[in-house]
Image (cartoon, rainbow, N blue to C red):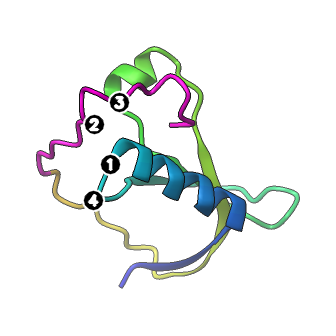
Amino acid sequence: MSSLSSLYIKTETLETILNTLKTKNAKGVEITISINDETNNYSQNLSSFISQSKEEREAKKTKFYVGNGKVFWTDGKITIAEKKEQNNKAPDNISDDDLPF
């Protein structure tokens, strides 16, 4: 084990995610977690947001933030997981214009 972290997600955010997943007829959601070297004013160094595709990042699409937290234990040895190909494409008949992510 390399680290342990805690993440706080508000009920309203969970409801928004669940409603969006139902609208998109998706089975789940990928969340990106960012760990910073410095803590903020609330003693947090972890933030999370809905993962974006390369095209969304290049288009500078606004991130949908999920929650914040902190790393509370680490042995200093975090390794990179193997990258595997995935197909997370939404159905073509759903418009993403009114959805938060």
First reached walking from the N terminus: tag 2 or tag 1: 1
What's under tag 1, amino acid-wise?
A: Asn
Q: Residue at x 50, y 58 (%)?
A: 18
How far apart are the alpha carbons under marks 1 and 3?
A: 9 Å
Q: Residue at x 11, y 45 (%)?
A: 85
Magenta part mainly helix, strand or loop?
A: loop
- Residue 8 vs residue 76: left or right? right
**Cβ atoms under marks 2 and 1 closer than 8 Å:** yes
Q: Secondary structure at mark 3?
A: loop
Label 4: how many Cα within 10 Å (few below 14, some 14–19, many 20+):
few
Q: What is the CA distance from the residue labelled 4 to the residue labelled 2?
A: 27 Å
Amino acid at the residue labelled 4: Ile
Residue 70, given in percent of the width and then of the height, sits at 66, 70
* Foreground: disc 2 or disc 3: 3
Mark 1 highlights which residue? 25
Q: Earlier in the sequence, mark 1 or mark 3?
A: 1
Q: Which residue is identified by label 2? A: 90
In screen coordinates, is 87 left or right of 54? left
Secondary structure of the residue carrying tag 2 is: loop
Asked if residue 36 can be seen in this view, the reply is no
* Quadrant showing the N terminus: bottom left
> Mark 3 and mark 1 in contact (Cβ < 8 Å)?
yes
Q: Nearer the viewer, mark 3 or mark 4?
A: 3
Report, in whole angstroms, how far the alpha carbon at label 2 lies from the one at label 3.
8 Å
Rendering coords of residue 76 (x, y %): 46, 74
Residues in magenta, as a range: 84-101
Image point 69% across, 67% down: which residue?
11
Query: Residue under circle 4?
Result: 80
Task: Tell me the element at label 4.
Answer: loop
Query: For residue 94, which numbered disc appears in the image?
Result: 3
